[in-house]
Image (spheres, grey):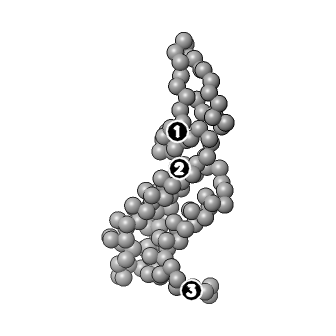
Amino acid sequence: LFSRFLARCSLQIKGETVEQLEKLKYLGVIFTSDGKFEEDIDWRIGVASGVLLELVRSTVNKVEQSLKTKHSVFNSIFTPMLVCGHQSWTGTENTQTWIDAAEMGFLRRGARLACLDLVYPA
């Protein structure tokens, strides 16, 4: 049983008391009692960053790989790891900023750009 306001209540199903949880991980998504998803988003970014480190070693930093190949890796592996379960997230500006930063980190590495390199649209 989850409560948005951290209220304690007693719930029984067929005479058995159901425990009230502070957080629950279900189908890979972390639900917390306050209804926010920052912890789940942090965890997802951590998982995606771990995947990124492995991809950097095997694909992303390879000069011989085309940008098209790197972009395919981004769309097929990195992005799904990052946003799996996002349908249940309550979007905030911070949430979108965190996700954008993780995505841009991958794309910068794929294009072999540093954080301070300026890129102008064509």
Instruction: Check residue 117 in the rendering and tell me which mark sits there, or answer none.
Output: none
Chain-order first, disc 2 or disc 3:
2
- The residue to which callout 2 is attached is 39
Amino acid type, callout 1: Lys
Label 3: which secondary element? loop
Chain-order first, disc 3 or disc 1:
1
Q: Residue at x 49, y 71 (%)?
A: 105
- The residue to which callout 1 is attached is 23
- The residue to which callout 3 is attached is 118
Label 2: which secondary element? helix
Distance from label 2 to label 3 (Cα)?
32 Å
**Is mark 2 in CB contact (under 8 Å) with mark 1?**
yes
Q: Residue at x 61, y 58 (%)?
A: 95
| Farthest-out residue, top | 15
Is residue 57 positioned above or below 22 on the image? Answer: below
Residue 76 at least partly seen: no
Distance from label 3 to label 1 (Cα)?
42 Å
Residue 122: quadrant of the picture = bottom right
Amino acid type, callout 2: Glu
